[in-house]
Image (cartoon, rainbow, N blue to C red):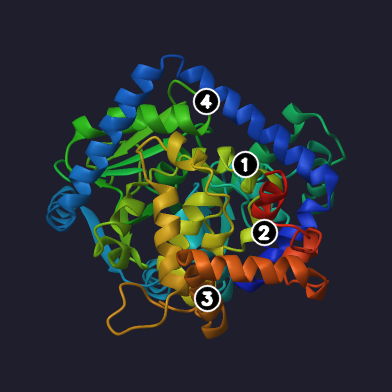
Amino acid sequence: MSEHALNFMPSEGFRARAKDVVENPFLRQSFRGAMDFLIGKRAGQFPNPEELETLRTLGEQIRQYNLGKLPALLVQLEENLSRNGIQVHWAETPDEANAIILGICQAHSAKLMVKGKSMVSEEIELNHACEAAGIEAMESDMGEYIVQLAGEKPSHIIMPAIHKTKEEIATLFHEKVPGVDYTDNVDALIQIGRNVLREKFLVADIGLSGVNFAVAETGTLCLVENEGNGRLSTTAPPVHIAITGIEKIVEKLDHVPPLLSLLTRSATGQNISTYFNMISGPRKAGEKDGPTEVHLVLLDNGRTQAYADEQLRKTLQCIRCGACMNHCPVYTRIGGHAYGTTYPGPIGKIISPHMLGLEATATMATASTLCGACGEVCPVKIPIPDLLMRLREESFSAPHENPSMRGQGAGYSRLMTAVWQGWAAVYRSPSLYGVVTWLGSRFGWLMPSRQGPWTSVRVPLKPAPKRLRDMLRERG
């Protein structure tokens, strides 16, 4: 529905995009207010710190247990899904995933696909692939529908249009939806969106959805939602295509309730979501509704790279609640679009390098204060600060043979390495430290007024005219 394809933006532009937001007080205030609201909602759902820590530990154990058995669980999932009548497809790259989905659409001469919320479909940029193939792909989640009308990407993984005000949405609907008068009444705007989308559900050839949890022992696809659009997308059209990353698997149905409790309370501050869909196959003989054909596309897109490393594997524990973003002091000031990637904020900084390579994301790991808030609120205890430090090391260390990550050493600089090696040498030697600080205190006036990124927002660094040791010596 957008006029221009919105492809991933290079990380080199991150600083400029972030600066634009920081210099916009209205956007900063909007983000701050929205994040404070979400933080408060989450806090209200976990009044007992002991219960929270117990549940977080359980969630971490469940995710680590299932990741430890992931290869076997993928085989078991495929076997049980196939037994249930669901066709399973494997895609290593976004291009392969798009080709599979478009192939299914073309086999059914599909012209319209209605989509439930799916971050993986954003990850592969499915909407643009459909547009190029002459297929209309329409978002049915209200937030996704709004950003699609605006020709934008989601700025948050749970609330895609959180950066939009009701006045902006009112103007957008008035300009983009035929026959709609301007109104900034929220209930009226929701109803306008519903009226448009309900017609699409009835005539769509294909329904597409994401997957929150895929249960290997039963061959069941679980979908969490609040609006009912996910249920309509997966039942009204004659063909349902689900797409998910290979890490979203649990072995047993018993593993789902703790993760669901963590997901809904961490994401939107709800005890439980409005809808919890469990899909185990296409419509059977005698049933009156549901698709006649169900497909699941399992996407890799760099996930096996993370899986191969014991430390980086913890990235795949994520259940996509967005709590790390809501509490991040960087994200709350610049929003999601500044990152230029599908997954923004702390989770985006640790997962995007596996999907896009360190060449495109080398600077993202440094866009963090390392305050630790993201790790403290993660419902499955992903050690995000530790992973950020690991990614910094991978990005800026010298390239070497057999790297653990694609693009390792992408940010390496001989000059910067020499500077830090010199710095380390000075601090290891008391006598050398004394000489350098003496020279700095006497010749500080030689320091340049421009000192790279530091002076873009700060005054130039200049050594004090007297060292601390000199002042102490003067005092006796």
| Mark 1 residue type | Met
Q: What residue is disc 2 on? A: 338
The quarter of the picture where residue 193 lies is: top right
Name which residue type carries label 2: Ala
Give the residue displayed 33% in from the left and 63% down from the top.
303
Q: Estimate how packed mark 4 is, as few (under 14), some (14 to 19) or many (20 or more) residues with alpha carbons within 10 Å.
A: many
Residue found 44% across the figure and 58% down from its top? 389
In front: label 1 or label 2? 2
Q: Which residue is mark 1?
A: 142
Comparing 180 with 303, the one in front is 303
Query: Which label is found at residue 290?
Result: none
Earlier sequence position, callout 4 versus callout 3: 4
Label 3 neighbour load within 10 Å: few <14, some 14-19, many 20+? few
Give the residue type at disc 4.
Answer: Arg
Q: SS of the residue at dot 2?
A: helix
Camera-side residue of 419 and 218: 419
Q: Secondary structure at mark 3?
A: helix
